[in-house]
Amino acid sequence: MARNPVLRTFSRHIMKPLAFWLLALPGLWLGWQWALLLSGQPHDLGFNPIETTHRFLGDAAIRILLVSLAVTPVRDLTRWGPIMMIRRRIGLAAFWYALLHILAYLGLDLFLAAGMSVSGALAGLWRDVAERIYITLGMTAFVLLIPLAMTSFNRVQRWLGGRRWQGLHRLAYPIAILAVFHHGFMVKGNQLGPWIHGGILAVLLGYRVFGMIARTRSQASAKAS
Amino acid sequence: MFFRTSRPWQARESQVTPKGLFLNRRKIIASGGALALSGLAACEAETASQPSGGAASGSRPTSGALDYRGTAYDVADTQTPYPAVTGYNNFYEFGVGKDDPARYADAMTTDPWSIEVEGHAGRTGRFALEDVVDFSNLEERIYRLRCVEAWSMVIPWIGVPLAQVLAAFEPTSDARYVQFETKLDHDEMRGTRFRVLDWPYVEGLRMDEAMNELAFLAVGLYGEVLPNQNGAPVRLVVPWKYGYKSIKSIVKIRFVSEQPETSWNRSAPREYGFYSNVNPNRAHPRWSQASERVIGGNVFARRDTEMFNGYAEQVAHMYAGMDLIENH
């Protein structure tokens, strides 16, 4: 938490609410479009609203996850520390969109395909996870997100201790890699979208790896001298 | 489920009538003849007098309504609304988004249009589209379309039987397969600037499949000239196969002796076979093909996918004895 009272007020009353609404916006838009659709009005979900929903939620989850990974590099480059105060919020939003993505798949596809049977839908999900590599990857990414979301509270963070918490949350990188491959293996043909996500991820990951190497080197040279 | 309406005269038509006669009957309908026998003789004379190669009427409309006659090819399900048929397309040459073709396909020039015919055939060379398709002799066929992505539509196509067009090129006995190629123009087709697939798009059929009564060459839908996003000015429609077999905006027809390359098969052979017959029992490696989303109606509507998309009666005999999982 910021010690500077002005910054604390700014964070609490402006930055955090702003981040919240910005992150909620895609979800609110989607909900609004479904409300229009279900009430028989013109909407922007296209001719295959279920497909649109899956793509939209999946894209939201991946992109928000990438944004959460970009927070630290942005802080380093701009030297503007307060941005760190919204990192958790961004990471959690990625988790919520991923959860919605799976619930939509369960409810709008598997449940209907299984003739409106909940157990049939869950069996379908399990079969997909076992048989279809892109779903295996996506589901693994989501399962790994769960401990991150669960350890996002201050109290748990303190209980874990900074170093362990940080170690655990480095999982965000493998999760993002899994998510990008999930996307890439899902699309037909060689499409640009996953390459863009993958490119951004590679830059973010490269920045972190480079930083780590630089730190080890400077530590080594400090020891040597 | 049976795809045809249950009116008894429809079932009788394809079961009893021999194929040759059956094709001619299309023409009887054209002449409006209820007196079938006298009409048949007239039609045969007419067919013989044509120098082959379609009627070469020398003109074709490039927009608006087409003259055509109805046929018995119909399905029980409701037709997909026009906005969905023309607004939800896979035509990767214009982008991979479903609305990209509707947005960008207008850039494609479709007039003039010629088709290059190559390979094992008596008549090869470059033909104007109006010399390949007889625009004064068009018919409507309402077919189901099943996309490999597990969604489906019902579309009233306007066009001519593929067999009639191919026969006019006098394919030789070496022509065991026929390959089709889509136009490729990087300026007009913005999606081709990225290599989603190995452009140009190619597709193919075994010769007996191409000559099957259902294989259709469409130049229109819903009574009007094909919109560009649906594959103007001429496209294939093979309703018992996944949609990507029905190649759009055709500029080349090749009669070949070996099984030709096809774009999706080249891209991912494990996922897309040469035959690509609709088969609910053979899952795509990445998703089930057992059922499909119905586009254009109730959002939650699904239907069970049928073997050969419901056209088993007309096509199953061509695959007798073949392992359709192996030869997917």
Image: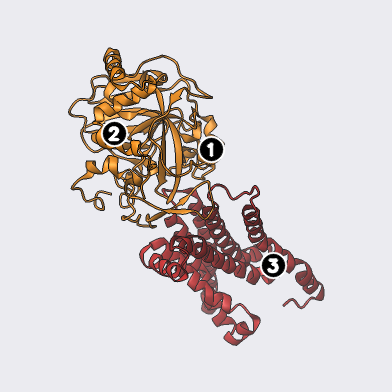
Chain colours: A red, B orange
Please tell me whether mark 3 sits on a helix, a strand or a loop: helix
- Of tags 2 and 1, the one toward the viewer is 1
Which of the two labelled residues, at mark 2 and mark 1, occupies the earlier sequence position?
1
- Of tags 1 and 3, the one toward the viewer is 1
**Neighbours of disc 3 within 10 Å: few (<14), some (14-19), many (20+):** some
Q: Name the kind of residue labelled 2 in the image.
A: Ala
Q: Name the kind of residue labelled 1 in the image.
A: Tyr
- Of tags 3 and 2, the one toward the viewer is 2
Residue at image position (47%, 22%) is B67
Q: Position of residue A110 (x, y in %)?
A: 46, 63
A65 to B321, vertically: above or below: below
Please tell me whether mark 2 sits on a helix, a strand or a loop: helix
Q: How far apart are marks 2 and 1 (CA)?
A: 27 Å
Same chain letter for marks 1 and 3? no
**Neighbours of disc 1 within 10 Å: few (<14), some (14-19), many (20+):** few
Residue at image position (54%, 61%) is A62
Q: How far apart are marks 1 and 3 (CA)?
A: 50 Å
Q: Circle 2 marks a residue in which chain? A: B
Q: Mark 2 points at which residue?
A: B210
Q: Name the kind of residue labelled 3 in the image.
A: Ile
Q: Distance between the residues labelled 3 and 2?
A: 63 Å
Please tell me whether mark 1 sits on a helix, a strand or a loop: helix
Residue at image position (67%, 70%) is A84
A145 to A198, vertically: above or below: below
Foreground residue, A41 or A157? A41
Q: Mark 3 points at which residue?
A: A83
B138 to A40, vertically: above or below: above
